[in-house]
Amino acid sequence: MRISADVAVIGAGMAGVSIAYELSDAGSVLVLEQESRPAYHTTGRSAAMFLESYGSPEVRRLTTDSRPDFDAAGELLKPRPMIWVAPPEQMDRLEAMAAAQPTLVPAPRPETFCPALRPDWCAGALREPGALEIDVMGLHQHYLGGARRRGARIVLDAAVRSGRYEGGRWLLDTAAGPVEAGAVVNAAGAWADRVASALGVEPVGMRPMRRTAAVVRASGVDRDWPIVGDVGETFYFRPEGVGVLVSPADETPSEPCDARPDDIDVALAIERVNEATVLGLRSVHTAWAGLRTFAPDRQPVAGADPAAPGLFWLAGQGGYGIQIAPALARLAAGAVTGKGSPVPAALAVARLRSS
Ligand SMILES: Cc1cc2nc3c(=O)[nH]c(=O)nc-3n(C[C@H](O)[C@H](O)[C@H](O)COP(=O)(O)OP(=O)(O)OC[C@H]3O[C@@H](n4cnc5c(N)ncnc54)[C@H](O)[C@@H]3O)c2cc1C
C-alpha cells in the first residue's frame, strides 16, 4: 500500500529528525530511515561538543543561534570549557584565532585547567569558557519524540531506492513500499549525493570523511577537566567514562558506509595526546569511527534545489551537525514551507549548481 505525506524526509539522524520536528506542525511528515534504528550512523558517533569557536563564520552563527533551543529542550548541555593549545609551530594560527574570535580568552597557564598538560609542550593557549557538552541522544530523542507527538511517522528499514517527480508529487520506491509526497528532504548524511542520484538529481559533490574516536583508560582524570585540542587540529581529548575520549582529528575520504575505526588512527590519537600530556595512555577501552560529510566549500547545504522541483537538502554538516541542528533545521524547514527566512547564499544549494 502506498503511504502519502506532505513531506518525506530521507534519514533519521539528527538532521532528519530535527527538520521533521520543525515541519510536523505544518502538515503530514514521514521520515524514511534505511537502518532498523535511527541515529545509527554519524549522529550516534559524535564527540558531543558545542563550541562557538568552531567552523566558518556561518557555522559559528548557526551554533550561537541554536543555543536557546538546547536550553529550552531541558538538561541537554553541561559545561565543558575548551582549551585550544598550540606548540611553537602553531602560534601563528593561535594568534589568528584569538584575533577572529571574541568568545576566546587567553589562557597563559593552561595546566591550571588541565594539570595533565605538559607546560613545556604548550607555547600558547586560548580558552572558550562557554563551551558545552551535549546530550546528543537526549537532543535526538527530543526531536524524534516531539515529531511523533505532532503526528509525524517514522518508518525504519525503509531505504529509499529510487524516485521520480511526476504531476507535482514525488513518487519514491522504498524498502518499506511505495511513498508519495509533495516534497522530499534529503537528510541522508554521507549518502546525500547517492540519494540525489537515486532521485535522478545531480549530486553536489559531498565528501564523506572518516573521523576516529576512542575511550582510553587513564588514572587521575578529573571529570571536570576541559576538552583540550590543538589549534592545528591534530588531536583532542576530554574526560569520558573509564578515562579520556581521544581523537586524532582525522579526515580520511570514504565511501558512504558503516564506518569502522582503523587501529593506526587510534594509535596516532594516543601518541599525540601522550606527547602533549603526562597521561601515559596505553589501553583502549573502546573505539569507533563516523563519517563527517562536507560539501566542497565545507559549508552546510540547506534549502530548495534549483535543479529539482520539490527537493530540499539538509546535508553537509561536517563536524558541527549536532551543535547547529536547531538553527539549521529551522532554516531548512522555512524553505520547505516558504514561510521562513531566506537561506543565506553561503548555505544555499544554488551555490553548488552555478559553475
Ligand atoms: C567522531 C565524530 C565527532 C563529532 N563530533 C561532533 C561534535 O562534537 N559536535 C557536533 O556538532 N558534531 C560532531 N560531529 C558531526 C555530527 O555527528 C554530524 O554532523 C551529524 O551527526 C550529521 O547528522 P546527519 O543526520 O546529517 O547524518 P547521519 O546521522 O549519518 O544520518 C543520516 C541518516 O540517513 C540514512 N540514510 C542514508 N541513505 C538513506 C536512504 N537511501 N534511505 C533512507 N535512509 C537513508 C542513514 O542510515 C542515516 O541514519 C562528529 C562526528 C564524528 C564522526
Image (cartoon, rainbow, N blue to C red):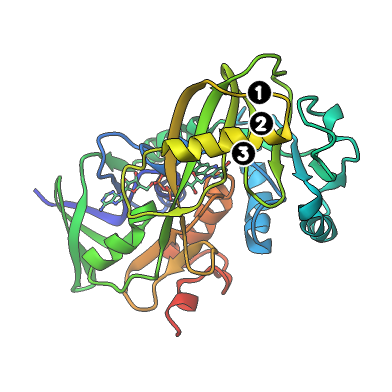
Q: Earlier in the sequence, mark 1 or mark 2?
A: 2
Count of numbered marks: 3
Is there CB contact under 8 Å for labels 1 and 2?
yes
Type of amino acid at the residue the image marks with label 1: Gly
Please state the horizontal and vertical placement of residue 193, each as a whole percent of the image. Answer: 33, 63
Q: Earlier in the sequence, mark 2 or mark 3?
A: 3
Please state the horizontal and vertical placement of residue 177, each as a whole percent of the image. Answer: 12, 49
- Return the residue at label 3: 49
Type of amino acid at the residue the image marks with label 3: Met
- The mark closer to the camera, 2 or 3, is 2
Is residue 76 found left or right of 194 in the rendered image?
right
Q: Residue furthest right?
A: 108
- Return the residue at label 1: 280
Q: CA distance from mark 2 to mark 3?
A: 22 Å
Q: Is residue 114 above or below residue 252?
A: above
Tag of residue 274:
2
Check disc 3: other Cα within 10 Å, few if <14, some if 14-19, many if 20+.
Answer: many
Is there CB contact under 8 Å for labels 2 and 3?
no
